[in-house]
Amino acid sequence: MSADGHGIAAGHAGPANARDYTVFDAELSGQTFSFRLLRRLLRWVRPHVGRAAASGAFVVVASVLAVLGPVILSRVVIDGILMPESGFAAPSFGMDAAAAWMDRATGFGPLGAACTLYAVVALLWAIFLYLHRILLSRAVLSALADLRRDLFWHLEHRPASFFDNVAVGRVMTRITNDVEVLFQLLAGLGLLLGELVPFFVALVVMFSIAPKLTWILLTAVPIVAFATWVFRRTTRRIYREIRNSVSTLNQNLQENLSGMQVVQLHGREARNLEAYSEINRYNRDQENRAIQVETVYNPFVQSLASAGLGAVLWFGGRDALEGVITLGSVVLFAQFIDMLFRPIVAVGEQYNVLYRAMASCERIFQALDWDESLPEPERPAALPARLRGEVEFRHLSFAYRPGEPVLQDVSFTIRPGEKLAIVGPTGSGKTTLIRLLGHFYDFPRGHVFLDGIDLRDIRARDMRERIGVVLQDFHVFAGSVRENIGLGDPALSDERIEAAARLVHADAFIRALPRGYETPLLERGANLSHGQRQLLAFARVLAADPEILVLDEATASIDTTTERLIQDALGRVTAGRTSILIAHRLQTIREADRIVVLQHGRVREIGSHDELMALRGVYHTLYELQFQDGAG
C-alpha cells in the first residue's frame, strides 16, 4: 500500500505504508482526563445548547424547591404553628409569608395552608425535575445521534483498504458501545448537577441557621469522599476485568453456537464446556469481588449518614434545649443529611464513567480523524448517458503491500458488448482486477480506461453506477424482497424491479413467498435458499441496468437447476452489454467470447476456449485439473 493507506502500483510505489492499523486493536483504558477531548465532544452538544441551558435552569429551580419543602415543615409547621413559643426565630426564606398568603387565599387555617403550600412546592419540584431530565435527555440523545450519524458517514467513505486492515467488530464498537458510554457520561453529568445544586443550596440554608452544627456535619463529607475515591479506584479495576470476561464469554459462546455442527461432529462438547466453564468461573470470581467491595462500602456510607443524624440529634438537641436553635431547625438538619452525602456518592459513581468515556472519546475521535480516502479528480470527466462499455487495462501493475505484487504488467482490452471470462488459479489477481475497475483502490493514471477515458479522471461514484457486480454471496439488508432488489433507489419503479426479477426467473418464487415482494428477509436471507438469494442478486444488478456486468464466481455455489435458470437469463441479459465473467464452471466460461488466463498476476493467454485448448498451455492445464468433471 501507499503511504496514504491504499494499494500501490508495482513500480510506482511510494514510501512504505505509514499507517498503523493496530491502533484500532489497542485497548484504551482511559487513565487520564482530557479537557481537549471533552471540548471536542461539546462540538456536537453545541447545536442543542438551548435545551441543555433550559435543563440547567430547571434543575436550579427544582433544587431550590427541594430545599424549601423541608423549610416549610420545619420552620413554618413545627416552629411557627406547633411550637410557636420557641423563642428563636430561624429564617423561613419567605415561607412564613407564603403560608400566610395561602391561608388568606384558601381559608384553610394556618396548618391547612402550610400543608397546601408544601404540596404545591412538592408538585412544582416534581414538574421542574421532570422538565430538567426530559430536556437533558433530549439534548444528550440529539447530540449523540448527530455524532453517531457523522461517525457512520465518515466510515462509509473510507476506502476498501481500510476495511481490509481493520476488523469490522472494532469499527462497530465505536458506533455502538463507545457512543453509549458517552451518553452515560453526558447524562450523568447533567444528573450530577441535579445532586450538587441542592447540596450547595442546603449548605446556604444550614449556615444561615446554625453554622456550628453545619461545620460538625461537614467533617463527615471528606471521609465519605475519601471512602468513595478508594472504592471507585478498586471497583474500576474489578469492573474492567468483569467487562473483559463477559466479552470473552460472549465470544466463546458465539463461536460455539455458530459452529455447533462442527462441535457435534467432532465430539467436542465436553472440551468446549470445560473451556467455557473456566471463563465463566473467572467471571464469577470477579463479580464476587465486586459484591464484596460494595458490601463494605455501602454500609460504611450508610453508617456515616446515621452518625451524622446522631450528631444532629446530640449537638442540635442540646442547642434546642438551651434555646440556641429551634426544634424545627434540628428536624431541618436531619432532613438535609441526605443532601450532603448523596452528591459525594454520585460524584464517585461518575468517576468510572468519566474515565471510560475518555477512552471512548479517544476511540471515536481516532476513527473520525482517520483521513484515509481515495483521491478524486479535481475536474471529473463527464460521462455520456450511455457508455459503449469498452474497458482497457494498459500495463497495469498493482500491489496491496509493497514488495508483494498481485498484478504485473497486465494489458488487454474488453470490446463493447463482449463477454470476456477471466480464469486462473487462486491468488492470480482475478478479483483484484474487478476491484480496480470499481475504483476501490488507488492506482496511478494511465493504466485503466473506460471508453478511452482514464479511470482516474472519473469519480468513483460515477464509475460504480455504470458497473453491476454479482458476487458469490448475496448481501441481504433489513427490509423486504422489493427493497433488497431496488436498494431504496427512487428511480427504480416497482414495475422495473419486477421486470428484472422476471428476467432472471426470480419472480415465480418471490410471488410464492407469504407476502410476495413485500416479504421481509431474515438476517442473511435465512428464509431463502442459496440459489434464490443468487437470483435476487441478479435481479438487483439488472434493475440498475449497468452498461458493464461483472460476475465474480456468481454461479459457483448453486444447484444445477438454478444455474440453468441463470444461464438462460444471462444469455439475454449480456447481449449487447460488456460482461466480465470470473467463474470456475466450464459452461459459463465456454459461453464467453474470449478468455483471459492469469497466472501469478500476469496475463499468460488470451483467446476463445477452443483456441486456448489448442495451445495446450496454462488454460489447458487448468481445464484438465479443474474442469474435467464439467467436461464429463
Image (cartoon, rainbow, N blue to C red):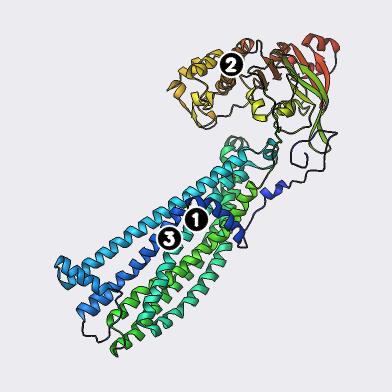
User: Mark 3 or mark 2, which has the lower sequence index?
Assistant: 3
Instruction: State how far apart marks 2 and 1 are (Cα).
Output: 52 Å
Query: Dot 2 surroundings within 10 Å: few (below 14), some, or many (20 or more)?
Result: some
Query: Dot 1 surroundings within 10 Å: few (below 14), some, or many (20 or more)?
Result: some
Q: Nearer the viewer, residue 273 or 257?
A: 257
Above or below, 300 against 127 in this view is below
Q: Position of residue 96 (x, y in %)?
A: 24, 74
Q: Which residue is mark 3?
A: 56
Residue type at mark 1 is Gln
Q: Nearer the viewer, residue 497 or 129?
A: 129
Residue type at mark 3 is Gly
Q: Quadrant of the C terminus?
A: top right
Residue type at mark 2 is Thr
Q: Quadrant of the N terminus?
A: top right
Instruction: State how far apart marks 1 and 3 are (Cα).
Output: 17 Å
- Label 1 or label 3, whichever lies nearer to me, is 3
Dot 3 falls on a residue whose secondary structure is helix
- Label 2 or label 1, whichever lies nearer to me, is 1
Q: Which residue is mark 1?
A: 184
Disc number for residue 562: 2
Q: Residue at x 47, y 59 (%)?
A: 188
User: Do tag 3 and tag 2 residues touch (Cβ < 8 Å)?
Assistant: no
State whether residue 241 appears in this view.
no
Instruction: State how far apart marks 3 and 2 are (Cα).
Output: 64 Å
User: Mark 1 or mark 3, which has the lower sequence index?
Assistant: 3
